[in-house]
Amino acid sequence: MDRGEQFVNGVAVASVLGALLAFLVAPAYTVFPLLAFFGVVTYGWKAHQANTAKLLMFLMTASTIVILGLITVYLILRSIPVFQAMGLDIVLKTSQPLWSTSQGIYSLVPMMWGTLVTTLLAMAIAAPLGVAGALFISEIAPGWAREVIKPGIEILAGVPSIVYGFIGYVIINTYMMEEFELANFGSLFAAGLVIGVMALPTVVSVAEDAIDSVPESMKSGSLALGATDWQTIKSVTIPASFSGVSAAVLLGVGRAVGETMAVTVMLPHQQVLPDPLYDVFKGTETLTSVIAGQYGVASGNQMSALFAAGVVLFVTVLGLSIASQLVEAHMERKLGGSQ
């Protein structure tokens, strides 16, 4: 590495660190180190393109890790006050009152339960229908049908969640209120149904890509040995693509856990546990809906409780990501390599 490359690397790294420090201490001055970064990268790209490309890839990777770390630390620091005030009751308290700003009492149990129930309901819809739809598109549907269905599903994935939520509020909530005479306008069942429909395109699209990536030689070999199309799908295609299909389902779970606008629109904003707990036709809140509904007026420990909800969401999504990686690694070992 010559001196020119060392100069580019040194100035680029220093300017990125300077921009980060300025953003944390004096945001108004962040633009100056960024200008220095863009200037030295422009020079480096013209004079030392290969070295600059490697530098940019390194900085992008490092920046992702640093930003994730800063978000994690910020969430934890902002949630500490409510843990100091409530202790583990913030995630364990089940007796009334569960959420009272006047009394300074905050429990995330109703929101955690609401998130769990809506996610389970959503995945009971999205997982089987999504995997079945992916198998149909990849293995059964004729070419002309595949060309129509696949783009349509991808378009559905791009529909804003507020649209799904509004349709669910106007049609599903109204129908259930009239037909079942519910006590509240909005229920966990209705929210889970809408979230399941929202997660369906994600599961179908990712699972179809995984199934389609199974080598054709494996399928042809199975058919050549006398297996039927269904036996090939059941014994070859699904096991070979299981890691990708499971990742698709976990992505759907992540979509369901993190869904905000639809549940905010559809659920009644009541911080209570359903009675009985298994009654999915009662209404409560989810972790995302309580954040969306209260962050604009929250302060003090109430705001800290919302950050605690963010910590729970973060840990949940992190757990799903780790589980996805473990499943994929297990299946790769079982199948003797990656797809």
Image (cartoon, rainbow, N blue to C red):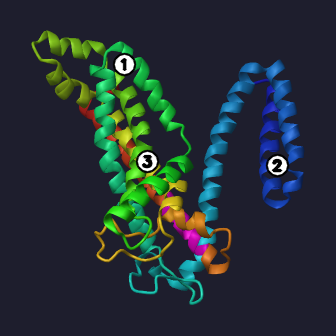
**Residue beneath label 3, please?**
321
Residue 51, percent across and down?
A: 73, 24
Amino acid at the residue labelled 3: Ser
Mark 3 surroundings within 10 Å by alpha-carbon count, few (fewer than 14), some (14 through 19), many (20 or more): some
Amino acid at the residue labelled 1: Ala
Amino acid at the residue labelled 2: Gly
Q: Is residue 251 visible?
A: no
Q: Is residue 55 above or below residue 313?
A: above
* In this view, the mark in front (1 or 3): 1
Which stretch is magenta? 304-314
Q: Is residue 190 above or below residue 333?
A: below
Whole-number angstrom distance, CA of label 3 to CA of label 2: 32 Å
**Residue beneath label 1, please?**
145
Residue 292, percent across and down?
A: 59, 63
Mark 2 surroundings within 10 Å by alpha-carbon count, few (fewer than 14), some (14 through 19), many (20 or more): some
Q: Is residue 43 left or right of residue 267?
A: right
Mark 1 surroundings within 10 Å by alpha-carbon count, few (fewer than 14), some (14 through 19), many (20 or more): few
Numbered badge on residue 18: 2
Q: Is residue 258 left or right of residue 187?
A: right
Q: Is residue 84 left or right of residue 336?
A: right
Tell which of 40 and 251 is nearer to you: 251
Q: Quadrant of the C terminus?
A: top left
Which one is earlier in the sequence, the residue at label 3 or at label 2? 2
